[in-house]
Image (spheres, grey):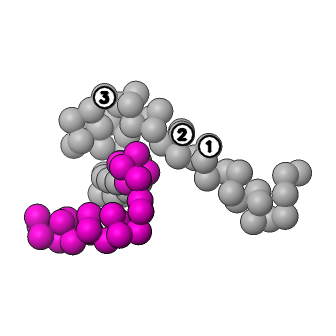
């Protein structure tokens, strides 16, 4: 796994991905995958990740806020 991760990091560095962006994207995908494994059950996901349920809830809410404006833009603007 370490070799795959190092290859991904090399690719990201070559693409000039900033650390903050990489960390944010990793966290978002990690939580999303954990939620899927736990059938979107927040408490079970939080326990599996070793964080508080409120942290998961807050992060998911933040991800949805970011996603909504993009969905509006795809439909042709806000209504």
Q: Which mark is residue 65?
A: 1
Look at the image and tell me whether residue 56 can be seen.
Answer: yes
Q: Quadrant of residue 5?
A: bottom left
Where residue 47 appears, as percent x and y from the top left, is 23, 37
Indicate the secondary structure of the residue bearing disc 2.
helix
Where does label 3 land, which residue? 52
> Is residue 22 one of those drawn in magenta?
yes
Q: Which mark is residue 44?
A: none
For marks 3 and 2, give the one nearer the viewer: 2
Where does label 2 land, which residue? 62
In this rendering, position of residue 3 left or right of residue 51: left
Give the camera-side residue of 71 and 26: 26
At x 67% / y 51%, what residue is drawn? Answer: 68
Which label's residue is closer to the chain start, 3 or 2? 3
In the image, residue 43 sits, relative to residue 35, either above or below, namely above
Label pair 2/1, CB-CB below 8 angstroms: yes
Q: Residues within 10 Å of mark 1 (few under 14, many from 20)?
A: few
At x 77% / y 60%, what residue is drawn? Answer: 73
Q: CA distance from mark 1 to mark 3?
A: 20 Å
Where residue 66 appears, as percent x and y from the top left, is 60, 47
At x 45% / y 38%, what residue is drawn? Answer: 59
Q: Residue furthest right?
A: 79
In this rendering, position of residue 78 left or right of residue 24: right
Read off the magenta span. Answer: 1-23
Indicate the secondary structure of the residue bearing disc 1.
helix
Q: CA distance from mark 2 to mark 1?
A: 5 Å
Give the camera-side residue of 71 and 21: 21
């Amino acid at each position: 796994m370490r070799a795959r991760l190092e290859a991904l990091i090399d690719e990201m560095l070559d693409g000039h991905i900033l650390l903050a962006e990489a960390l944010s994207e990793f966290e978002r995908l990690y939580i999303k995958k954990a939620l899927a494994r736990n059938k979107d059950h927040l408490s079970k996901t939080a326990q599996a990740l070793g964080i508080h349920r409120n942290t998961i809830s807050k992060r998911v809410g933040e991800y949805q806020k970011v996603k909504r404006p993009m969905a509006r833009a795809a439909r042709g603007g806000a209504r």
